[in-house]
Image (cartoon, rainbow, N blue to C red):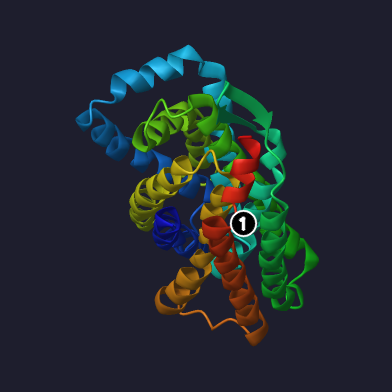
Amino acid sequence: MREISIGVFSSMFFAVTFILNRSMELSGGSWLWSASLRYFFMLPFLFVIVYYRKGLAPMKKEITRQPLPFFLWSVVGFVLFYAPLTYAAAFSPGWLVAGTWQLTILAGVLLTPFFLLKIETKQGFNIVRQKMPFVSLGITSIILIGVVFIQIPHAQTVPLKTLLFGVMPILFAAFAYPLGNRKMMELLDGKLDTFQRILAMTIMTIPVWIIFAVIALFTVGPPSFNQVFQSFIVGVSSGVIATTLFFMATDRVRHDQGKLAAVEATQSTQLIFVILGEMLILGIAPPTSMAIFGVMIIILGMSLHSFHAVFGHQKQLKSLSK
């Protein structure tokens, strides 16, 4: 499935987030700046792209048509997702944050019954509540087992307080990201393309990021040049390229929960890129054998997701259309 390939490609660029966020924390940078600067740098790039594609007017129309839901789900999908991730980077290495982040795959599956699905039949369109994809849930549970194996070595060597502050924010973000993304897709129903949707969500959350920046300015002072530069790289690589690719892939399969779960599961490949990146850039020690075993389980789970998405989910769609 082409969407799975796009998802894997996006995870490579998204891995930059975990590596550089940890790098900025190790060099003394504030997570408040790391979070807000990413979206400040995303804004001009996305604006130019959407302007060049003549998509500003339709985007503005959709924002003004329902501003409150647009603002709400933009905050959930961007602020409540990224702020906890940057905060967690102060307590855990990037590969551990990335490993725990894979719980977003499970979160996406568990959120399925909260969404409606439009089914085309001979009599017209039927609106039905989406059913829990139990096969996808079972496969995702395999990924969850892999996440547990990754956490075990870390849990044995750090204080409980540090582990909680490094893991609990990620658990929160893991639900916020798919919830915000799926709610925005449901709200727009294909009226905006991927670039328009990301730009609109970025614009709607800029006031919140400004508040973050003001708090950071008065508490820790201005960001260093190194943090600004690394935030710029994160903004382009993860914020623009990775987010665009991932949203593009999920938008293409938004009406098929099995394939959507498979695309979301591709983010598990971030672990490979993050581990290699931190070893090369930050010089961290390789993960323990137990953690590597956990990574292998996660990759197995993602592969099963892909297989199920291609060969198994069409039966469910056919049964719904009868």
Q: Nearer the viewer, residue 187 or 42?
A: 187
Farthest bottom residue in view? 289
Q: Is residue 93 visible?
A: no
Depicted 233 relative to depicted 272: above or below: above
Q: Can residue 53 be seen in this view?
A: yes
Farthest right residue in view? 160
Report the residue at 56% width, 18% height from top: 68
Report the residue at 54% width, 50% height from top: 259
Report the residue at 56% width, 37% height from top: 182
Q: Nearer the viewer, residue 167 or 240?
A: 240
Spot occupied by residue 110 in the image (x, y as percentages of width and height): 71, 46
**Three-letter amino acid code at disc 1?**
Ala
Spot occupied by residue 216 in the image (x, y as percentages of width and height): 51, 42
Q: How many marks?
A: 1
Q: Which of 127 and 137 is in front in this view?
A: 127
Spot occupied by residue 165 in the image (x, y as percentages of width and height): 71, 57
For the C terminus, the quadrant is: top right
Element type where label 1 sits in the image: helix
Q: Nearer the viewer, residue 96 or 220?
A: 96
Report the residue at 40% width, 47% height from top: 239
- Image-quadrant location for residue 321: top right
Depicted 55 relative to depicted 281: above or below: above
Q: Mark 1 points at which residue?
A: 88
Spot occupied by residue 150 in the image (x, y as percentages of width and height): 67, 73
